[in-house]
Image (tube, helix red, strand yellow):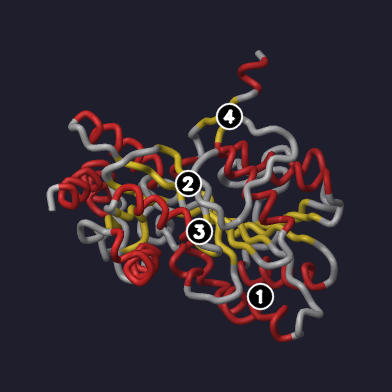
Amino acid sequence: MAELNNVITYREAVAEGIAREMRRDPSVVCLGEDIGAAGGVFKTTQGLFEEFGPERIWDTPISEQAIVGAALGAAMTGMRPVAEIMFSDFLACCWDYLANEIPKVRYMTGGQVKVPLVIRTANGGGLGFGAQHSQAVENWALTIPGLKIAAPSTPADVIGLMSAAIRSDDPVVVFEHKGLFASKGPRPPEGYEVELGRAAVVREGSDVTLLALASTVPTALAAAERLAADGVSAEVVDLRCLIPMDMTTVLASVGRTSRLVTVEENPHQGGWGGTVVSIVVEEGFELLDAPVRRVTSANVPLPFADNLENEVIPTVDKVVAAVRGVVDY
């Protein structure tokens, strides 16, 4: 039984990560649609209402503007709100707050007012939710100065990054990937925290660096396993955060392997891989022995049908093909 207690799902890790911070800091509150007694539409807030009650777990109307606007006001007046936007696609409904208000308050007040606000949201495709509920939109937030961006790939990182995000005095958007909710991993110890902006080498290799984020991390690891059978040694780096972006770890890995393939669920245009590649070319061009390749989603709305969606998003086959191209260059 003790061993079972040391394993947790990604879904459970969301609630546990929040609960740990709520127990530690009474200024932490949560708000969003159906996050209370219902436990969240994805069951990622299950148990919070029972433990902390309606004074700290606030069910809201179906209004993204109301949720984020209330969270902004709470953050400016001494609380540490954790606001849920049910699907990341719906960030578009409160874009003025996200782009024009939240990231600029601290700057425009000369540091007199902080915004210790977390916006967490279910992101990404692979589950057949259709074009309006399946987008990976980290690249939207990436265009906005003043926001920090985290996207965990494991249950432990969910807890560690959530702790760091809630403790941050700057606004953080945490993208929880829908396709990872059922995945399992070790439960980290109490007090576990993952520094925002610190990538992780999750598999060592010598021939090529696979740089991934959230759901593309298991895809990259599966591709690395297949490539190993062909004698290709792939190093897999989990970027974990887009802002701050740990290019020190990325460049060190490219220095060891001389090749880079980025694996992202964003469409090719405007995706975070383009930012990574530009920095690698500017600061580490001499490290490369082959052109950089980007594996991305296609520039189309996400199809509903599973077989069509699989054609759009990154897959193990696509990653393996890209790696073989750079290794054989």
- Which of these two is toward me, 142 or 324? 324
Give the amino acid type for the residue marked by disc 2 in the picture.
Answer: Lys
Contact, CB < 8 Å: mark 2 with mark 3? no
- Tell me the mark number nearer the camera, choosing from 1 and 2: 1
Taking the spot 66% from the left edge, 75% from the top edge, the residue there is: 102
Contact, CB < 8 Å: mark 4 with mark 1? no
Taking the spot 46% from the left edge, 62% from the top edge, the residue there is: 138
- Which of these two is toward me, 279 or 140? 279
Contact, CB < 8 Å: mark 1 with mark 2? no
Q: Point out the tag, 2 or 3, that comes first from the N-terminus.
A: 2
- Tell me the mark number nearer the camera, choosing from 2 and 4: 4
Residue 28 appears left or right of 204: right
Secondary element at tag 2: helix
The residue labelled by disc 1 is 102
Q: CA distance from mark 4 to mark 3?
A: 24 Å
41 versus 114 height, above or below: above
| Residue reaching furthest to the left | 328
Give the amino acid type for the residue marked by disc 4 in the picture.
Answer: Pro
Question: Do we see residue 305 in this rendering?
Answer: no
Mark identifier at residue 186? 4
Q: CA distance from mark 1 to mark 2?
A: 25 Å
Q: CA distance from mark 4 to mark 1?
A: 34 Å
Contact, CB < 8 Å: mark 2 with mark 4? no
| Residue reaching furthest to the front | 286
Q: CA distance from mark 1 to mark 3?
A: 23 Å
Give the amino acid type for the residue marked by disc 1 in the picture.
Answer: Ile
Count residues near mark 1 (Cα–Cα under 10 Å), then give few for <14, some for 14-19, many for 20+. many
Mark identifier at residue 246? 3
